[in-house]
Image: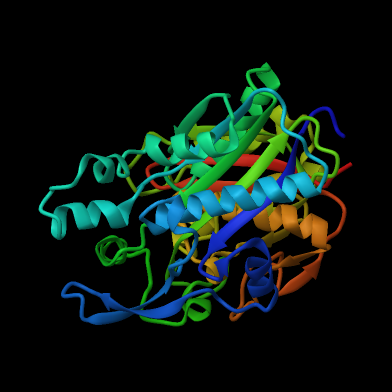
Amino acid sequence: MDSRGIGICGIGTVTGYGWGREVFWDGLTEGKHAATLEGGYGLNHDETAWVAKVADGGDPADGASRFSRAMRAAAREAITDAGDRGWRPGKRVGLLHAVVLGEVDLWREFYLTRNADLKPREYLALMPSTPMSTFMQEHGFHGPAMNVSAMCASGNAGMLTAKAWLDAGIVDDVVFVATDLSATPENVLHFTRLGVAVVDTDPLDACRPFQEGSRGFPAGEAAVAFVLSNHAERPYALALGGAMSHDAHHVTSVDPGLEQVRGCFRDALANAGVPASAVRYLNAHGPGTAQCDRAEAAMLEEFFGPDTGLYSVKPLVGHCQGAASAVEMAVAALGYDRGYIPAPPTVAPGHPQLLNGRTPVQDGLTVKSSLGMGGHNSVVVLAPPA
């Protein structure tokens, strides 16, 4: 295995498509979005909205909420997958959990229906340490366990933190999970008010990253897990390195000068030790908003050649907030393994390098960018397995 990179040797997912990696991949491959029309949205909870929401499911023993069940299910699937691909856990297995808004359903119930009155055990279920603790107990892992939070860039932040742990010898392996099941009516309403979420139109029509007429993104939910190791036998992909920065400009808007975004791309390539000419794909944040499309298109044109393909899967999976970049890294890693990228079909004139539908994977690196709300810039460089 390439000594520079850590291996993604197991993947598990719970998404709007359903519970499991294969239903996720099948949905993407069909080019159909995961969103369904959900009732109970709007200011008075009397409207419908297109939302790629995780359905009820999972093991009740994993907790009372969809959040805890999805987190544990995705992680368990990734661990089983890694074992089937030859991975054996080392002595120190750490857990990183990327999360922005945790246990939203339980907190909503706590305040709105339970009058802030719970039994001690029920109250402990609200704590961010609880799903991590029960996960570590289930598997007998004793490495460090920590939450990571960087808004929509949390998945990239978690991947780079895991690589830092492995490179420093703090752990032998990392289970990295990103969980966001926060598409409640209240949260979706406020993203709609911000002018970025679109709930009243079919997602493939409303969300058109790098195409004319895009209005924003559909809300989505997901839990995505990876097993990461320096001793993977058959990894899906390698994480070579990356970078993070902050605009320090505005609570929602990207700094129009793009200085920090540009520096993040440059630093990521340097950290990974690769030239820009080796990059074949830009797996973009691509939420379909004008400012993000402009920023990432500018980076594509400044750093990479005309043969670098551009894509975003948010029209299909929705914007999964704290789990967004993890969902999108899973697409890149599975794409290397399955031989094609399940890019959304284009629906309007757009950037000439934008992929249109299912596209065979060519040799080369993938840059996964994520521009988290509030100025969180992040870039991860992925490579096919050696």
Residue at 61% from the left image edge and 77% from the top image edge? 349
User: Between 57 and 207, which is closer to the camera in this rendering?
Assistant: 57
User: Between 330 and 176, which is closer to the camera in this rendering?
Assistant: 176
User: Between 325 and 137, which is closer to the camera in this rendering?
Assistant: 137
Residue at 66% from the left image edge and 29% from the top image edge? 163
Q: Is residue 331 left or right of residue 386?
A: left
Q: Residue 311, position in %: x, y? A: 65, 62
Judge whether residue 347 can be spotted in this image. Answer: yes
The quarter of the picture where the C terminus appears is: top right
Q: Residue 258, position in %: x, y? A: 50, 42
Q: By what rule are the colours in the image chosen?
A: rainbow
Q: Is residue 190 left or right of residue 162?
A: left
User: Between 133 and 316, which is closer to the camera in this rendering?
Assistant: 133
Q: Is residue 156 left or right of residue 7?
A: left
The quarter of the picture where the N terminus appears is: top right
Query: Above or below — where is 228 with respect to 81?
Result: above
Q: How many marks?
A: 0
Q: Residue 383, position in %: x, y? A: 79, 44
Query: Above or below — where is 206 with respect to 314?
Result: below
Residue 130 falls in image quadrant: top left
Query: Above or below — where is 88 with respect to 367?
Result: above
Judge whether residue 262 can be spotted in this image. Answer: no
Residue at 43% from the left image edge and 68% from the top image edge? 56
Query: Above or below — where is 45 with respect to 224?
Result: below
Residue at 68% from the left image edge and 25% from the top image edge? 166
Q: Residue 350, position in %: x, y? A: 62, 72
